[in-house]
Amino acid sequence: MSLQQNSISLHEWADHLLQKGKMAFSIHELRESYPNSTEASLKLALNRLSKKGKILSIHKGYYLIIPPQYASRGIIPPAIYLDALMKHLKRSYYLGLLNAASFYGAAHQQPQEFFVFTNFPQLRTVNKKGIKVNYISKKDVSNLLIEERKTEGGYLKISSPELTAADLIQFEKRIGGLSRAATVLNELAEEIKFENINEVFLKEIPSLTIQRLGFILDKILNKKEIASHLYNQCIKSKLKFYRKPLKASGKIKGFPSDEKWKLIINTEID
């Protein structure tokens, strides 16, 4: 039985989902709605809608419905559909790095590249209509380090200012290096709350990232109060520092060291 023999066409069905505020659907939902249709007829109908720019496949078996206001772009911003996609994949996640920083007013450019942190196994990078979504795998993160924001599509999980600060340092190569990270961190520091730099935070973040973050806040950005609180929490938690280079890939011989943060200062941060 073909789609045309059902009560409504796939185009009408997709429009009905949009009217209910649903901007995506899975192939499983489609099959349930058209139980008498063959796989071939479903595939043909999906291809037709895709060619018309009405839908867009962003993951195997998962389709975005493109609302009229996004028709010219042919895609919905990831911040709108990400939560629904992750629920479909049954993944924990959060939007991080510059994307999260922008929610706190610390990254002013509208990025065309998104960084989503999720658990293992690794998801492939997706590049659709000029928008790139990178997936970074890490162990599950405490919900205490994640915040929610309301979007057109529902809710979106983003890293807290404190977790964002740590990720900017740990994954600095992803955003253009330590100098770029420090620039964003300078504005982000205003959003960091002392009470959130605690035992939970220190357990989630690698010690080397803590050292680099502390050094940049302390010696580069002159955010002495935050740096002091971070350092005192490290002492309280008996976190051990080991002498490591500030720039991981740089040379280590012939450079001065910072005794407080136990770092070899082998690069300049603008």
Image (cartoon, rainbow, N blue to C red):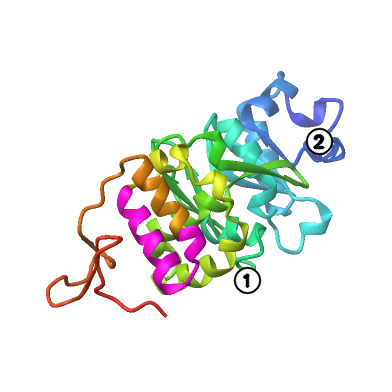
Which kind of residue does numbered mark 2 sit on? Answer: Leu
Q: Earlier in the sequence, mark 2 or mark 1?
A: 2
Left or right of 138? Residue 115 is right
**123 is higher (above) or lower (below) than 53:** above
Which kind of residue does numbered mark 1 sit on? Answer: Gln
Q: Nearer the viewer, residue 66 or 142?
A: 142
Kindly state the secondary structure of the residue where label 1 is placed: loop
Within 10 Å of disc 2 (Cα), the crowding (few <14, some 14-19, many 20+) is some
Within 10 Å of disc 1 (Cα), the crowding (few <14, some 14-19, many 20+) is few
Q: Quadrant of residue 114?
A: bottom right
Kindly state the secondary structure of the residue where label 2 is placed: helix
Question: Does residue 228 show up magenta in the picture?
Answer: no
Residue drawn 78% across and 36% down?
A: 10
Residue 18 locus on image (x, y percent)? 82, 40
Residue 112 seen anywhere in this rendered image of the structure:
no
Residue drawn 25% across and 51% down?
A: 241
Q: Mark on residue 17? A: 2
Q: How many marks?
A: 2
**257 is higher (above) or lower (below) than 58:** below
Label pair 2/1, CB-CB below 8 angstroms: no
Residue linked to disc 1: 109
Residue 218 locus on image (x, y percent)? 42, 66
Left or right of 59? Residue 77 is right
**144 is higher (above) or lower (below) than 99:** above
Residue 43 locus on image (x, y percent)? 63, 36
Which contiguous range is marked in magenta? 207-227
Left or right of 16? Residue 51 is left
Residue 99 locus on image (x, y percent)? 58, 58
Which quadrant: the C terminus? bottom left
